Image (spheres, rainbow, N blue to C red):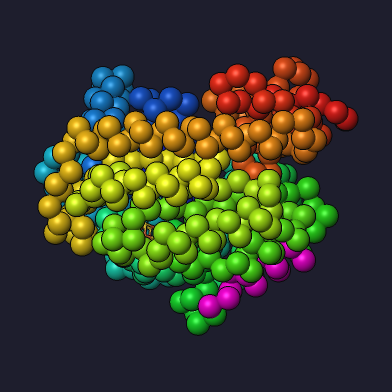
Amino acid sequence: MRGQLSFALCTFGCQMNKSRSEHLRYLFLQDGFSQAEREEEADVLVFNTCAVREHAVQRALGVIANLYRSALKKRGVPPILVLCGCMSELLREELLKKLPYINVLVGTQDFEVLPRLVWEAYTDNKRCVLFSPPSPPPFLEQGYKREGGTSTYLPITFGCDNFCSYCVVPYTTGPQRSKPKELILEELEAIVKEGFREVTLLGQNVNSYGKDFGCPQAFEDLLMSIEQSFRGTPLWVRFITSHPRDMRKEVVEIVQESTLLCPYFHLPLQAGSDRILSLMNRGYTKSQYLDLASFIRERIPKAAIGTDIIVGFPTESDRDFEETLEVVQKVEFEIAYTYVYSLRPRTKAAELEDNVPERTKKERLEVLSKILKEGYLKRLRCHEGRRTEVLVFQENGKLVGKTKENLRVLFEDSKVKEGQFLQVELEVIPGGRLLGHRVSG
Ligand code: SF4
């Protein structure tokens, strides 16, 4: 019966949202819905939203309204419009006013009942709105069948306790809840059986995994159990996001000894000035960050370090910004995501005056990008001529490789296949890119 209803899922935001959408897709299929071939043809349009930046919110609102209109035009009758995720959680009333044609609205806690709510909205021709308080979501503790492919995600925690002053996530997702280790290992087993070659363990702060059940070193214990259980399996295991305050050096040592765990550390710096870090409530200083980064470089010289940086946080002076640049010059990040500060409702930073002029923010972003690029190019040199293994995967319709350190590798060889592990020799080519020459297999 529900098979008569097709659905399309659009996802905004982070990997956690991508992972939840993957799960949501499974729940809809299990419930008898079918997947639409094209979004505009779907009976049910589901938007899994993000609220982390104002720009993303505005963009999402535009995409939702446009797609709704296209679907209405194509089908002749309105689709069932479903919104879930962080933006829904944060802007409930506002969304109902802005998009009065929403049929189902839930936040971050009620994903598992979405197919039922959609069905109710359809059969009873009513609007369903549900915002349950944070609790260990039952579906988080059940495995699910993934769509298939080379890489997938495995959430190990949900929610966040950190309350970084600029961040809305603790308000939209609630306190941290960790998935029991046994369930993670079972899910990993299923992932291996399904033929995935790479899995990324997800958490807002993976290093605090298990704190909520009173085990401060639970993340290290989890990594070691994964290593023991899956050694010899053709699988790479990554984890994001690490928190510079909570990441213990033992994690680096475990990765150094491991055959499965990938030496890529995503370690958001956010700012280099101690004054701004304190205003951000990040819980570490510039020198503590540098100490951790140099420990990684010393223990695993080829490891890659990724980061997130915000420019133009309220009261950020030229001197504060220079301190960020100093860290960037010292660490030479391989991967970086940079953002202009975005005021988020309900956060502590929203009480501060957003007093850095827009022009200054843009200029700082440009300078930062330039320095980041210089550091990246320097780091690339250590990969010239290096023989290493890469995993072949699809990215934007093209086959590319990825090193264990999370660096992209291009191929001239047209015979490579998705999901293959290949031995290649790396060549640094113009534009700061890596080319892989196959050396065996
Ligand atoms: S660690 Fe900080 S930035 Fe990351 S999700 Fe939690 S509050 Fe937000």
83 or 31: nearer the viewer? 83
Residue sitting at 63 percent across and 34 percent down?
380
* Numbered disc total: 0
Q: In which quarter of the image is the N terminus?
A: top left
Secondary structure character of the magenta stretch overall: helix
Task: Judge whether 50 appears above or below 69 on screen.
Answer: below
Residue sitting at 72 percent across and 17 percent down?
412
Left/right placement of residue 365 relative to residue 3 reads left
| Farthest residue, direction right | 440
Residue 26 visible somewhere in the drawing: no
Left/right placement of residue 242 relative to residue 196 reads left
Quadrant of ligand 1: it is: bottom left
Residue sitting at 73 percent across and 49 percent down?
235
| Percent of width and height locating residue 314 | 20, 51
Q: Quadrant of the C terminus?
A: top right
Residue 222 among those drawn in magenta: yes
| Percent of width and height locating residue 41 | 38, 25
| Farthest residue, direction bottom | 214
| Percent of width and height locating residue 60 | 28, 36
Residue 39 among those drawn in magenta: no
Task: Judge whether 222 appears above or below 68 on screen.
Answer: below
Residue sitting at 54 percent across and 61 percent down?
292
Quarter of the image where one finds residue 403: top right
The span picked out in magenta is 216-228
142 or 14: nearer the viewer? 14
Residue 429 visible somewhere in the drawing: yes
| Percent of width and height locating residue 298 | 66, 56
85 or 350: nearer the viewer? 350
Left/right placement of residue 421 relative to residue 103 reads right
